[in-house]
Image (spheres, grey):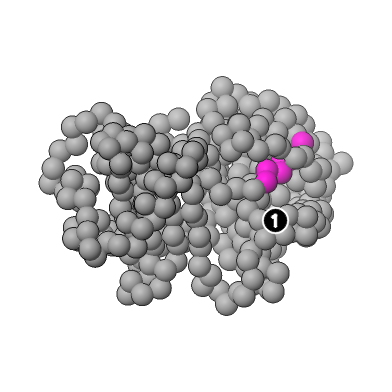
Amino acid sequence: MKVCIEADGGSRGNPGIAGSGTVVLDETRTTVLRRIAEFVGTTTNNVAEYHSLINGLRAAQELGALEVDVFMDSKLVVEQMSGRWKVKHPDMKTLALQAQRLAAGFRSVSYTWVPRAENSRADELANTAMDAGADGAEPGIIVNETASWNGATTRPSRLILLRHGQTPLSAAKQYSGVGNPQLTDLGERQAAAAAARLGARGGIDHIVCSPLARARRTAEHCGEALGLDVVEHEGLIEMDFGRWEGLTFQQAHEADPETHAAWMRDITVAPPGGESVHDAYRRVSATLAELRDTYRDSNILVVSHVTPIKSILRRAFDAGPEFFHRLHLDLASLSVAEFYSDGPTCVRLVNDTSHLKGV
């Protein structure tokens, strides 16, 4: 799939109140898929231009695009991102590197300079952001509108799914279910990086998390970045690995090879003294229904574990039980699934870890 990005940034004074505007469109540039306006704060026009590009590349990634055509009226950004001009200013180097890392995730990205008159949609959003800043808004996303491609006629309950950061057990590749390990130092940094990304993106209405310490702490980082309270829900805890808790794959297999092999084949088989994947799926499905009812038509950040997140994604994909063994989820990864009250579902992002580069 190819999308087009129209991006623009501006400042009233240089530096001054700065805003960015981004419009993501289909390949023909006739259908708007996403509109984003960000109040960047007090900075330069060029910094705001880069913010508009970064927001567009992130949105294209979330939409599942493979190819991207970028249109901007900033000659500087177009030439720098095309590799023809060097990036000299320290602030610009950081932003250019961030944009380059995002761009590397696509099959191809092209950059085209256009006159300002041909970039009016993005310019309007940039001015909306600057107006909000002039009225006292805090830096962050002011407009974040997504069009529906799936035939839905209602607004979705959008679940932003975040796996917790690293713990000593995950670092050692040990089964970690209802035990309560804390985050490692790396896990804290992973959680902070995810929180920084979500805080910059904005648009989240509620945070719900598993009460287990590793998820709760990850959610607390996000709550601080977003200015939101964290609500715990028992239905989001990890599956219970029973007597396999704390064992590696090899250790569990050696302890009970017949049961372990059956468990790998059949999601209705439970670890000794534990919970089957199927039982965890039923529990999480009930929790999902409750969240959709409680936070109807909202953007909900769900901070949880591998099995609950896979369960929610399985519902969104309408996939079979084999789904659990065919999807990998990294620590502190982000996925996005939408559920519409009139039936359709849409998965916009799976296992994104771009915010963890350099952590």
Q: Quick one: which residue is furthest to the front in this view?
A: 135
Above or below, comparing residue 180 to residue 115 in the picture? above
Give the residues in magenta: 206-211
* SS majority, magenta: strand
- Regarding residue 281, the answer to whether it shows in the image is no
The reply, left or right, for residue 152 in relation to residue 36 is: right
Which residue is depicted at the point 71% across and 27% down? 181
Q: Residue 251: percent from the left, percent from the top?
A: 69, 35
The reply, left or right, for residue 249 in relation to residue 237 is: left
Q: Which of the two residues, 184 or 216, is positioned nearer the viewer here?
A: 216
Q: Quadrant of the C terminus?
A: top left
Tell me where residue 330 sits by quadrant: top right
Find out whether residue 207 is within the magenta segment. yes
Q: Around disc 1, counting alpha carbons within 10 Å, would you say few (fewer than 14), some (14 to 19), or many (20 or more)?
A: many
Three-letter amino acid code of the residue under disc 1: Ser
The residue pinned by badge 1 equals 311
Above or below, comparing residue 224 to residue 40 in the picture? above
- Regarding residue 8, the answer to whether it shows in the image is yes
Q: Quick one: which residue is furthest to the bottom in this view?
A: 151
Which residue is depicted at the point 25% across and 28% down? 90
Mark 1 element type: helix
Q: Residue 3: percent from the left, percent from the top?
A: 36, 65
The reply, left or right, for residue 111 in relation to residue 224 is: left
Which residue is depicted at the point 52% across and 27% down? 189
Find out whether residue 217 is within the magenta segment. no
Q: Residue 47: percent from the left, percent from the top?
A: 30, 39
Q: Residue 288: percent from the left, percent from the top?
A: 75, 56
Above or below, comparing residue 82 to residue 256 in the picture? below
Q: Quadrant of the N terminus?
A: bottom left
Above or below, comparing residue 317 to residue 303 in the picture? below
How many callouts does the rendering have?
1
